[in-house]
Amino acid sequence: MKISGVYSFKHGKEIIEAEFASELQEIKQVIAAVDGTKHKTKVSREKTMPGRILYEPSSLNRAFEREFEALNWQSKYKVPCEYPTEYYTSDYTPPASLTTASREMDFVKNRVGVEVQFGKYAFMVYNVCAKMTIFHNHGAIDVGVEIVPLKELASEMSTGVSYFEQFVWDLEHRGVADIDIPVLVLGITV
């Protein structure tokens, strides 16, 4: 696959190039190593495109995982969550299993967090505007990289997959908040 779109959110590109150049080089190496043509295997059952062969997001995700792990990136990096219980009503006691969980980031290495997102739009926004800040606040990352498809690639996936151009437009119109961390958004194509 190749990088065909680059967006710097809160100076993410500049900071990553200056302070995390070797990690950025590995990310570029991973993207180049994934042969997207091998993952166009999903037969669509959608009404708007029955029988059409599409890119399979879960297969692409596994390919990225193999490549990142080969370069010693920690996959499925988790931070624990202990949910507050003081907001329940006095007549409710939750089971213990419902008050603990974790949040997960796709890949982490040397304080760089990476999310590969071939899903719905809400997940892209959550990754950059919430999850990466949470992982920063937990001391796991200083910067983030969000890898997403360009519209050209997303149009060959199931309906509802978001894409680089839409995501960048929204980030530009949202603006940057004090709590946001630097993120480099990479749009990829096959």
Image (tube, rainbow, N blue to C red):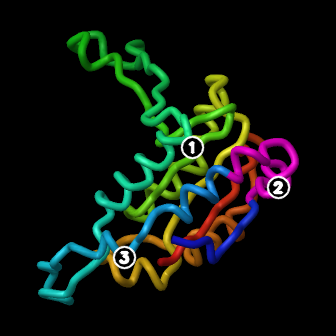
Q: Is 81 or 187 nearer to us in this picture?
A: 187
On whether residue 188 falls in the magenta region, the answer is: no
* Element type at mark 1: helix
* Numbered mark located on residue 46 in the image: none
What residue is shown with label 2?
11
Q: Is residue 172 above or below residue 115?
A: below
Residue under the image location 46 percent in, 36 percent down? 75
Counting from the top left corner in percent of width and height, residue 84 is at 43, 17
- Few, some or many residues within 10 Å of mark 3 (<14, 14–19, 20+): few
Side of 187 where 124 appears, left or right? left
- Disc 3 vs disc 2: Cβ atoms closer than 8 Å? no
- Disc 1 vs disc 2: Cβ atoms closer than 8 Å? no
Decide which of tag 3 and tag 2 comes sooner along the chain. Answer: 2
Residue under the image location 70 percent in, 69 percent down? 6
What residue is shown with label 1?
130
Q: Is 102 or 108 nearer to us in this picture?
A: 108
Q: Which residues are drawn in magenta?
A: 9-25
Q: Is residue 169 above or below residue 59?
A: below
* Element type at mark 2: loop
Mark 3–mark 2 Cα distance, whole angstroms, equals 32 Å
> Can residue 91 be seen in the rendering of this structure?
no
* Numbered mark located on residue 37 in the image: 3
What's the amino acid at mark 2? His
Decide which of tag 1 and tag 2 comes sooner along the chain. Answer: 2
Q: Nearer the viewer, mark 1 or mark 2?
A: 2
- Few, some or many residues within 10 Å of mark 2 (<14, 14–19, 20+): some
On whether residue 11 falls in the magenta region, the answer is: yes
| Secondary structure mainly formed by the magenta segment | helix
Side of 153 where 114 appears, left or right? right
> Can residue 69 be seen in the rendering of this structure?
yes
